[in-house]
Image (tube, helix red, strand yellow):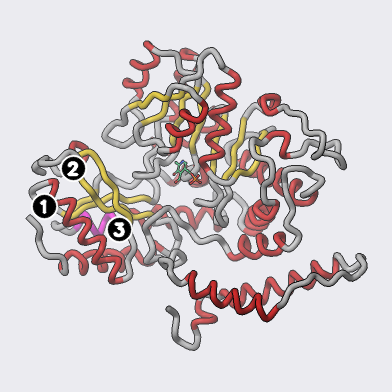
Amino acid sequence: MLSDPDAKERWRWAEEGRILEEALAQLAQLFGGEPTCEPDWDAGRVRSVLSQLALKLADNYPYFHPLYAGQMLKPPHPVARLAWALALTLNPNNHARDGGRATSQLEQECITRLGRLFGWESVLGHLTGGGTVANLEALWVGRELHPDCPAIAASTDAHYTHARMARLLGVPFILVPVGADGAMNLDALDRILDQTPVGTVVATVGTTGWGAIDPVDGLVARKDRYRYRLHADAAYGGYFNLIRERLSKAARLRLEAVSACDSLAIDPHKHGLQPYGCGAILFQDPTVGSVYQHESPYTYFTSSERHLGEISLECSRPGAAAAALWATLELLPLAPDGLFADHLWKSCCAARTLAGCLQAHPAWVILGEPELDILVFSTRSPRASALSRLNRAIFDRAASDGLHLALLTIPVGKARSTLPDLNPDVGEVTVLRACLMKPEHLEWGVRIFDYLEKARLATPVLE
Ligand SMILES: Cc1ncc(COP(=O)(O)O)c(C=O)c1O
């Protein structure tokens, strides 16, 4: 718990409160024409409940701090938090323009800007609760367009929800092995496609575990031969397209090829500085909107323009999410030479910095060069079972010292490609994983290594 007297100002949260107060006062003036109608709530009791809530919220890891590098969690930008809170005062619903007139327009603008990130000018899309629903919509559209050929193929390292969504859609789901780099193996895919018709192939642009990018360029090249739809799950990695010129040649080519996919999911609540839940689904061909066609006699009545509910699986959705994303894009445009891009690059450099520190020390090993800003690494031990216990013990020890990481369970064979002498006494091994998604992680890379070393030295050797 924060106990020092300056804690109130330390994270500038109080300053956010003051900015919000001014914006709320302005909004109240703008709605000053309506007759007064006092809402019935008791400010004293609200204050007291919020104070209780603050106590409960303290039971969280410090997600906003660089010492948190566990889950894929990036703090929303203050402008996003404030815009969300401001819009929430009106609580618009972006299902229909009737319920969310201004914010439907903002959502449309956000989708246009996200589309331009991939060179798509006349894109069809909308915001979603997150990557899972965005992917579901792409897979559903794929099934509706190719009912005769419904199977979905994705790599073994694709997000686990794809298999679940295939079950939900009632279509076969085919797993394609990955290569040593964690990306989909195209030879393996060809063998599958030669035997089984596949309606949609999912290319993961930045896997959750490793940050690997599937060979989207190779998948685009096969698209006509095998006649599949290509969906890019760029929920985590999509924003890196902005800085593709600074990445490896393979990453650049793979990211560049996303523009030739049929659809893509990108999560502003991952790298786009947004509060949960803000995902997005984009379709390159706007005519797929016909798949969503439905009758709704009670929703659309004040505008003849398209309502977002007409091209979305969900009905009600928060207009506040669009307001927050729009405000963020205004403040930090998606320009390759802008501040947003520089911050993304810093997170990649943070992963490289930590990788360099680990590689320079004989007690540590990295399991592959980081492509984006996720780093997978391990300490050393002769047997796989002992290595897992050791990594877990270091994970716990680091957490008790204030450094929060993630664990990743991988096939022992994968670990042996980096640790060839590892005795495979068990089939899987647990290694350490860091998501260095904050630009501040760059400054903290060396200090994070110091925390790791301290945790390792304090952990008894396990045989
Ligand atoms: C590549 C990828 N796809 C999909 C998802 C699911 O997204 P969400 O948690 O926003 O539903 C994730 C989440 O980490 C992801 O990394």
Residue 50 location, x and y as percent?
59, 74
Q: To which residue does mark 1 refer? A: 381
Residue at x 53% of width, y 81% of height: 8
Q: To which residue does mark 3 refer? A: 354
- Asked if residue 358 lies in the magenta stretch, the reply is yes
- Asked if residue 13 lies in the magenta stretch, the reply is no
Residue extent of the magenta highlight: 353-360
Query: If the image is split into quadrants, where does the N terminus sit?
Result: bottom left
Residues 441 and 45: in front is: 45
Q: Quadrant of residue 62?
A: bottom left
Horizontal arrangement in the rendering, residue 375 relative to residue 66 (left or right)? left
For residue 174, which numbered disc appears in the image?
A: none
Circle 3 residues within 10 Å: few <14, some 14–19, many ≥20: many
> Mark 1 to mark 3: distance in Å?
21 Å
Residue 226 location, x and y as percent?
46, 14
Q: To which residue does mark 2 refer? A: 418
Q: Amino acid at mark 1?
A: Ser
Q: Amino acid at mark 2?
A: Thr
Q: Nearer the viewer, mark 1 or mark 3?
A: 1
In the structure shown, which secondary structural element does the residue marked by tag 3 occupy?
A: helix
| Mark 3 or 2, nearer chain start | 3
